[in-house]
Amino acid sequence: MAATTHDVHDGHGEHHHGPAKGLGRWLFTTNHKDIGTLYLLFSLLMFLVGGSMALIIRAELFQPGLQLVDPHFFNQMTTMHALIMVFGAVMPAFVGLANWMLPMMVGAPDMALPRMNNWSFWILPFAFTMLLSTLFMPGGGPASGWTLYPPLVLQTGDAFPFVILAIHLMGISSIMGAINVIATIFNMRAPGMTLMRMPLFVWTWLITAFLLIAVMPVLAGAVTMLLTDRYFATSFFNAAGGGDPVLFQHIFWFFGHPEVYIMILPAFGVVSQIIPTFSRKPLFGYHSMVYATAAIAFLSFIVWGHHMFTVGMPLTAELFFMYATMLIAVPTGVKVFNWVATMWRGAMTFETPMLFSIAFVILFTIGGFSGLMLAIAPADFQYHDTYFVVAHFHYVLVPGAVFSIMAAVYYWLPKWTGHMYNERLSRIHFWLSVIGVNVLFFPQHFLGLAGMPRRVPDYALQFTEWNMVSSIGAFIYGISQLLFVYIVIQTIRAGDKATDRVWEGAHGLEWTVPSPAPYHTFDKPPKISTADAHG
Amino acid sequence: MSADNGYYVPHQSIWPIVGSIGLFVTMIGLANMLTGAWNASVLLVGATILLIMIFGWFGAVIKESESGLYSQQVDRSFRWGMGWFIFSEIMFFAAFFGALFYARQFALPWMAGDAGRLVTHEFLWPTFEYVWPSSGPAELGGEFQPMGWWALPTINTLILITSSITLTFSHEAMRHNQRQKHINWLALTIVLGLIFLGLQMYEYVYAYTELNLRLETGIYGSTFYMLTGFHGLHVAIGAIILAVILGRSLRGHFTAERHFGFEAAVWYWHFVDVVWLFLFICIYVL
């Protein structure tokens, strides 16, 4: 397994087997593990940047009145926080996990298109430099919310084309990353790794990659129309010329709804790897998990209208989108049932990855239920654009997607670094996170139901108490993530030696290679035994 | 070192980072041009870096391919990659077709009071009657005449369909190892593509000067120029790809069995052709 393949490069330098030295290693690398590391570190940095913006928002909202920032800057913070968290933190984190784990899980020597893999990553730092630089431009950064609705977004200052083109760059990066994932999964599996033997993380990423390729170009089209409407006098979103601002919302949410599944399907995959390991039982209902993931992906294309119930649609469209949205609860329910059934009568232990996974199952389900409430069109007229919506999507994204990423990092960090993380500190990190996140977001349900609108820097006095509670939760959650950074650094630099299998109940090919995983794994395809099939 | 002895993984490459820098400079240049801060020079520098990257990167891939480093499995990776890239392009066009469909089926009829939208009609646009092609209730861009479908667009359609057929002949010749025939049909395909592009440009000039049909002619002008414009851009890219393939064929690259570089170009060309058929029907005929 240690033998390398062809040591020929594209035209420069000597032969070598390990990583190159110095900065060049990271700039020119084609190694899936290097690129995975880059993605994960970049995502962590963006998580902290976007999180700081969230703390500015919560500090301003601690009490009514305007105290810390002016409203225009507040709006820039809500917009940038969302764009950075969606495109800079959550998506790159999952791509990083895919880079590290997919080739090892399917028994491949690397990603299918290694050079393009490097390009997918290295576009991102430039794209976010461009996006963040808009904060310092005349007129400030984008302040329209991440949904970029016209005509409001067309009033952005000089930052406007920079935002649009930065989004184009992120889209190019995502599409190339997704193409690589699909090519890797379809073409690089070791003999015997049949589709229905693939670990669920691989399956969920395959379907996510399909969603990415299908919708990122649609977002590119939508923002291109914004750009030409502003600078070349086209009329896509201008009713005077026969266009319609609502058209933008249709195109945007045709992208936007699959996008939320892009951020949650890999999370489903992660949790489906971790729960069986610490329950010491195979995943319950593997086949139904695969079909449920595919069903959710399919449904995600025909439910976008539920973001627009109050915007003006024919009644039949409202009804269609309402019922189609509710249908998603069925496959999602299958998944939650399967996770619980996997734990049922298992020999469970509660290491940190498992704690985060269990919290994921419970708290994501709360977010799913509030989603069902929002899906009811007549009720949504009340909830629309209130803090209830903010509470809903933060429940699926923070204790949903972000917790699954935390779980994945703790689960695979020993495999990546060869060291065990500090279990005691990581449990403190977990409990601070899980308490902080609930104190932060649960009161927002009450605020929304009581009528507090979202995206406002000031509010009526009766909303004060729950806003204070929410802001305190935000600072608990935010600051406890610094502990996470500390734990990761500590694990990389020191920590007990990890065994190859790391976790007693772990199954799957990634646990058959040494810890830390060698720079090149599976140059010769491994033999697949039934025990190693789908973790 | 036979090609089927493992999967070829290049170890280091400078081209992706060059590409990222090129994209960055291009985008910064373009954005500053749009705000009116800069002239085109930075944009051109960025585009030059991107061109250098494309030459360097494809050059490396071609060299590796010709030296037999690529196994069947690598070949399949390229196939998956190209296939899904084309799918992403289809979705990009779908956004613009969607805009056209929405404007014609919903936005414009509703402004004219259709489907019970009487209030919008009465209060905002009481005199507006919907007839496609429309530049909206405010008739942005002034009086115009629509582009007909007969004559030029029909000829262009025939040219593009013919080019797909000639390219298929070229591919058949390649498969039967008839290189000269392959090269002749390929060259003819490129010529047809260039004629198509020339006629499209003529059509644009005609539309601007004779019909007063402009990009700012309401939603009709927007969809007409954005859809045909992006399509034309893709024909141009396709023609450049085919020209590179022609150059490689003249140098003796490709074999009857292994020629995915050529095949990818064929896929791309057919994709551009199919998009045109939808365009012809949705933009010109209907």
Image: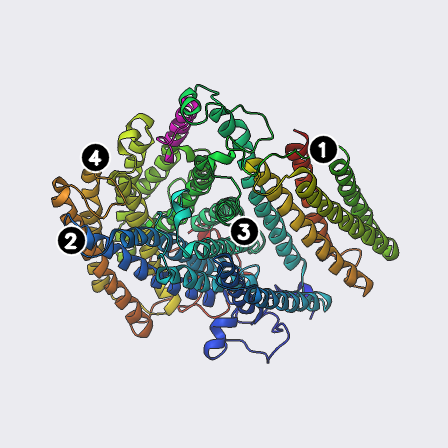
**Which quarter of the rendering shows the N terminus of chain B?**
bottom right
Mark 1 element type: loop
Distance, label 3 to label 2, CA atoms, is 43 Å
The chain that hosts pointer 2 is A
Mark 4 element type: helix
Tell me the amino acid under the disc marked 1. Answer: Trp
Tell me the amino acid under the disc marked 4. Answer: Leu
Residue A182, labelled with which disc?
Answer: 3
Residue B149, labelled with which disc?
Answer: 1
Q: Which contiguous range is marked in magenta?
A: A307-326
Tell me the amino acid under the disc marked 2. Answer: Ile
The foreground one among A514 and A364 is A364
Distance, label 3 to label 4, CA atoms, is 42 Å
Residue A449, labelled with which disc?
Answer: 4
Q: What residue is at 51 percent from the left and 39 percent from the top?
A: A236
Q: Position of residue A345 (x, y in %)?
A: 27, 43
Up/down of B109 relative to A409, above or below: above
Distance, label 2 to label 1, CA atoms, is 65 Å
